[in-house]
Image (spheres, rainbow, N blue to C red):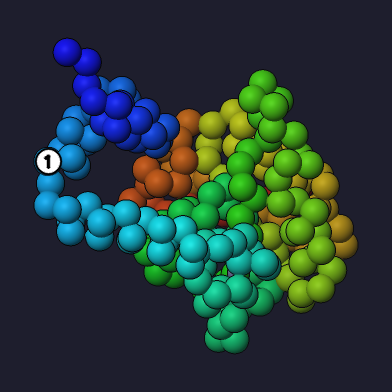
Amino acid sequence: MPLPEPIIALTAALSKLPGVGPRSAERIALHLVQSESAQVRHLAETMTAARERIRFCEICGSLTEKSPCEICDDSRRDVSLVCVVEKAVDILSIEKSGTFRGKFHVLGGKISPLDGVEPDDLRIGELEKRLGNEPIHEVIIALGTDVEGDATSNYLAKRLGRPGLKVSRIGFGLPAGSGLEFADELTLNRALEGRREMTP
Ligand SMILES: [Zn+2]
């Protein structure tokens, strides 16, 4: 006997989530249809509410409930420093390390022609606009140390290079070929402090 259609539909929807394969999707679906009705409703409502309340910050591109986000809006932070990260969650990693007091800019990916990601697909134009509008003296590139991270960093150093602006890159001690999410707080701190100026 095949599974009832609603379970098949739920499994199909769940298997579209990142990291959820067909087997896990079916297991979760079977779990949900046997759970307390109120519990499942709560889960569905939490998902909808989160989706409706979270947006991208219009300045830095982070995930936020209000735009500009708390960091962009915080006058105690150093406006002369902007740390460029690949993903919004990378901000959390750097914030946890606790020493960075500047602002952020989320690129939204890395240049990767093989995957069809070109510079125009990233928030580089937005960053250039900020360089014109904000008193930024240093752009700290905090991308992963894989091939795309290297290529994107070099591209940024060339494109952003202008008089009066330092472009640097973190790197010291970061695990080779990986992203920020794999680095612990101490490593990230050292990587930030040991950042090196890039020459365009
Ligand atoms: Zn922001």
The residue lying toward the viewer, choosing from 67 and 35, is 35
List the single residue furthest toward the top: 1
Residue 80 appears in view:
yes
Image coords of residue 98 (percent x, y): 40, 69
Q: Which residue is mark 1?
A: 34
Q: Amino acid at mark 1?
A: Gln
Q: Which residue does the image show at 35% across and 30% down from the upper left? A: 9
Residue 24 appears in view:
no
Image coords of residue 94 (percent x, y): 45, 60
The residue lying toward the viewer, choosing from 110 and 195, is 110
The residue lying toward the viewer, choosing from 196 and 113, is 113
Image coords of residue 172 (percent x, y): 49, 46
Q: Where is ligand 1, by quadrant?
A: bottom right
Q: Which residue does the image show at 18% across and 59% down from the upper left? A: 38
Looking at the image, residue 136 sits to the left or right of residue 8; the answer is: right
Q: Is mark 1 within 8 Å of ligand 1?
A: no
| Quarter of the image where one finds residue 136 | bottom right
| Quarter of the image where one finds residue 73 | bottom right
The residue lying toward the viewer, choosing from 152 and 26, is 26
Q: Which residue does the image show at 17% across and 13% down from the upper left? A: 1
Looking at the image, residue 161 sits to the left or right of residue 140; the answer is: right
